[in-house]
């Protein structure tokens, strides 16, 4: 091999090494933008009229157009939190969850951060008619997750009939806690809040707070190795797992208000409140397709089972 060719190959190897080092250094130096809490849960409906009655009348949310998807509708509880309802797609089976979503203060910077960490991301963020920006990825189990940068100046929302204004957690079916942790905890910085189970010594639920918020994600663990929805699972069982929670100062008072005002008429709901295994008061009701809404006290009134809380509670 001629000396000139050897020198050329040598310098090419040095350049390639330098480029790789620069990419690695750039990835390490990127700062993750803040993830500031829950944005929304997007679900499907097989009966838009019944779903509309449920979210407007029972839940008391404000119906709005959907700037992200003209086929959809938003049922808003605050300026930045809502339930997005989409038409049921063909072949959905028993699945009624489309995606979960978290607010961030910079969607494009978060997209670049994940891409630099070698997570599969879209080439660009999307823009909504309301000025919001967002992108969507898949978590390790294939669940769709959105990161939303709300409009710089969102329109004030008045929702006087809402049973609550703060979605404090969302949850969905999870097969592998370690797999999900690699994304939510290691990559995004979610942090432990509480874990527990139906029986002492078991872990059925794992709560991870967002890195820059007290809102949390709840892994609803199932024994089935996956992937996907277990073949034996019913739509009702899946709707219990795929859920969202509205924070309450007093679940008992909220339940009494719903009952006295007749807003529970015709609604699939519990007949009473209860204390959960985490020591917090709760009350469950279900939309027409079985997605569970869990009213939950901000703070525990009894000692939780299984583990102590390791981070501060959400507040009103």
Image (cartoon, rainbow, N blue to C red):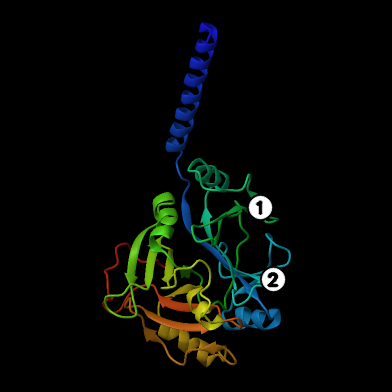
Task: State left or right for residue 218 relative to residue 312.
Answer: right
The residue labelled by disc 1 is 131
Which residue extends farthest front?
1
Where residue 120 appears, x then y in whole percent? 55, 48
CA distance separating discs 1 and 2: 27 Å
Q: Secondary structure at mark 1?
A: loop
Q: Is residue 299 visible?
A: yes
> Does label 1 or label 2 sit earlier along the sequence?
2
Q: Is residue 213 visible?
A: no
Figure disc tally: 2
Foreground: 51 or 88? 88
Front disc: 1 or 2: 2
109 versus 61 height, above or below: above
Where residue 33 appears, x then y in whole percent? 48, 46
Residue at point 68%, 64% (across, down) = 66
Q: Secondary structure at mark 2?
A: loop
Foreground: 295 or 250? 295
Place residue 124 in its image quadrant. Answer: top right
Residue at point 51%, 57% (across, down) = 139
Crowding near the residue tagged with mark 1, few <14, some 14–19, many ≥20 C-alpha atoms within 10 Å: few
Residue at point 55%, 78% (across, down) = 291
Quarter of the image where the C terminus is located: bottom left
Task: State left or right for residue 163 relative to residue 75.
Answer: left
Point out which mark residue 89 bears.
2
Where residue 59 appears, x then y in whole percent? 56, 79
Residue at point 52%, 19% (across, down) = 12
């Amino acid at each position: 091999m001629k000396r000139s060719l050897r020198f050329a190959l040598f310098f090419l190897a040095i350049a390639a090494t330098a480029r790789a080092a620069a990419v690695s250094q750039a990835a390490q130096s990127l700062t993750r933008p803040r993830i500031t809490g829950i944005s929304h849960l997007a679900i499907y409906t097989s009966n838009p009229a019944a779903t509309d009655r449920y979210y407007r009348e029972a839940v008391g949310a404000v119906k709005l157009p959907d700037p992200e998807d003209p086929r959809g509708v938003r049922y808003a509880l605050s300026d930045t939190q809502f339930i997005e309802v989409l038409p049921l797609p063909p072949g959905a089976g028993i699945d009624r969850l489309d995606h979960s979503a978290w607010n961030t203060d910079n969607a494009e910077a978060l997209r670049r951060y994940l891409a630099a960490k070698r997570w599969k991301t879209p080439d660009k963020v999307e823009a909504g008619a309301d000025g919001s920006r967002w992108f969507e990825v898949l978590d390790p189990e294939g669940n769709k997750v959105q990161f939303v940068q709300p409009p710089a100046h969102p329109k004030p929302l008045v929702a006087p009939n809402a049973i609550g204004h703060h979605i404090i957690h969302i949850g969905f079916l999870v097969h592998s806690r370690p797999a999900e942790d690699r994304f939510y905890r290691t990559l995004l910085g979610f942090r432990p809040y509480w874990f527990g189970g139906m029986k002492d010594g078991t872990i059925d639920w794992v709560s991870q707070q967002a890195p820059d918020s007290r809102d949390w994600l709840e892994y609803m663990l199932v024994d089935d190795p996956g992937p996907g929805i277990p073949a034996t699972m019913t739509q009702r069982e899946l709707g219990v797992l795929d859920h969202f929670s509205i924070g309450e100062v007093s679940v008992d008072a909220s339940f009494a208000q719903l009952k006295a005002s007749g807003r529970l008429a015709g609604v699939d709901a519990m007949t009473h409140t209860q204390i959960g295994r985490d020591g917090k008061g709760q009350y469950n009701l279900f939309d027409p397709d079985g997605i569970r809404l869990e009213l939950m006290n901000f703070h525990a009134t009894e000692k939780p089972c299984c583990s102590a809380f390791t981070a501060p509670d959400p507040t009103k």
